[in-house]
Image (cartoon, rainbow, N blue to C red):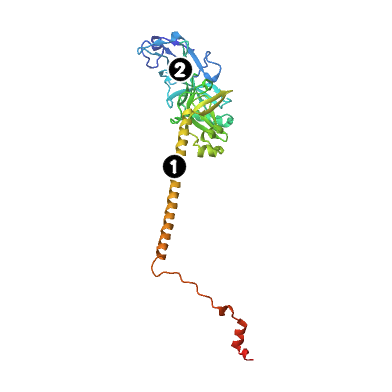
Amino acid sequence: IGPIFLISSLLILSSESFHVPPHAYAYVYPPTAINPKINKSPVSLRATVAESEIKIINDGSQRIWYKRADGNWKPRIDIRDLKIGQRLFCTKLRNELLNGKTGPKLFYECGVGQMDSNGKWQVINGMLRLGKAGMKSSVVKKKKSRLKAKADDVSGLIPLYVSRVHIANGKFEVSTEIPDMDKEQREKIPASSLKHGKELIGTVKKVKPYGVFVDVGASRNGLLHISTVAELFGCYVDKEKGLIGECGLERGAKIQVAVQSNVNKRLALDFTQKVKDELAREREREAEAKLQAEKEKEKLNTKVVVEITDVEADEEAMWAQFGAAPGYAEEEDEEVDDDYSRYDEERDIEDSLGLDSY
């Protein structure tokens, strides 16, 4: 891996000033060197440190020290101690993966490592994503130039920030900017380990016409199908409009889900039984409130009918009382004059004209 010297030898042979805790060995790893023990895959650049190269220092911990590109000696950081947003001073490695399936990537020596299952230390290099798959080579070249411009002219060190940590896989990613601390920071678990009925808290990431994709903290997002949503709410859901507007499944929404199935790398989700029970109780309360409102309305209508009936009865009583008052009697119909019935209109006209004298 690299030359290992006792501290006494280093102090004699080197004129540089550095500080190493007493009774500790220093592990020197040239940042730009290609180590023969590094895995050929550039995605997981690791170097194993022999067990004899680790020394128990005064504070009782096992630590590896390395000489950084600026000449300072620094202890390597255990990957388990990395925090999202933590700043690291890194040196770019020659290994690059510009035609990766998930986009172009660069790799940096950031002074991070871990103890493997055999008790040996491994150097873990950070991965920086330049962009998405299919990015033009000219754009990749520009981004690389910008990164080079940010590095120190003498040492080549560049400040980067921890953006993701995968402890189970022994990998971590870095970025040029401080990541959004509001995003999920928990470690991703293998999606294959999720069994039927496993309850999880997820975040809606994408809304599609056929359902929503939910991040449940696994290596693969799960699908909550629109038919499952419609069954829960007991109504028709109109694609994205219904999922967002009526069901509240907008991007970023937190929901409680359970694994419905996990077959052929397809993670299907359902709502938890707790969510179903709560919604059922809410429906019962709404139904009871609706029934109560109908009863109140019916009661009000009955009251109005009774009041109208009472008014009509009062009016009839008043008219009856008025009819029974003294001096009131219905006028008899006058007899019709028989002469009117024998009226001759033509003769009346003749009389008016004096024709009756002829």
Q: Quadrant of the C terminus?
A: bottom right
Seen at 44% across and 42% down, the residue is 292
Q: Is residue 338 above or below residue 140?
A: below
Viewer-side residue, 336 vs 286:
336
**Residue 308: x, y in percent?**
44, 55
Q: Residues within 10 Å of mark 2 (few under 14, many from 20)?
A: many
The amino acid type, in three-letter code, at marker 2 is Gly
Work out which residue is located at the far top of the displayed protein and give it: 52
Work out which residue is located at the far right of the displayed protein and give it: 358
Kindly identify which residue carries mark 2. 113
32 vs 348, left or right, is: left
User: Does the image show residue 269?
Assistant: yes
The amino acid type, in three-letter code, at marker 1 is Gln
Which corner quadrant of the image does residue 209 belong to? top right
Seen at 56% across and 78% down, the residue is 338
Cβ–Cβ below 8 Å for labels 1 and 2?
no
Mark 1 vs mark 2: give the one in front: 1
Q: Which mark is residue 292?
A: 1
Which corner quadrant of the image does residue 16 belong to? top left
Which corner quadrant of the image does residue 264 belong to? top right
Q: Earlier in the sequence, mark 1 or mark 2?
A: 2
**Residue 113: x, y in percent?**
45, 17
Q: Residues within 10 Å of mark 1 (few under 14, many from 20)?
A: few
Q: Is residue 252 above or below residue 53?
A: below
Q: Is residue 23 above or below residue 345?
A: above
Q: Secondary structure at mark 2?
A: strand
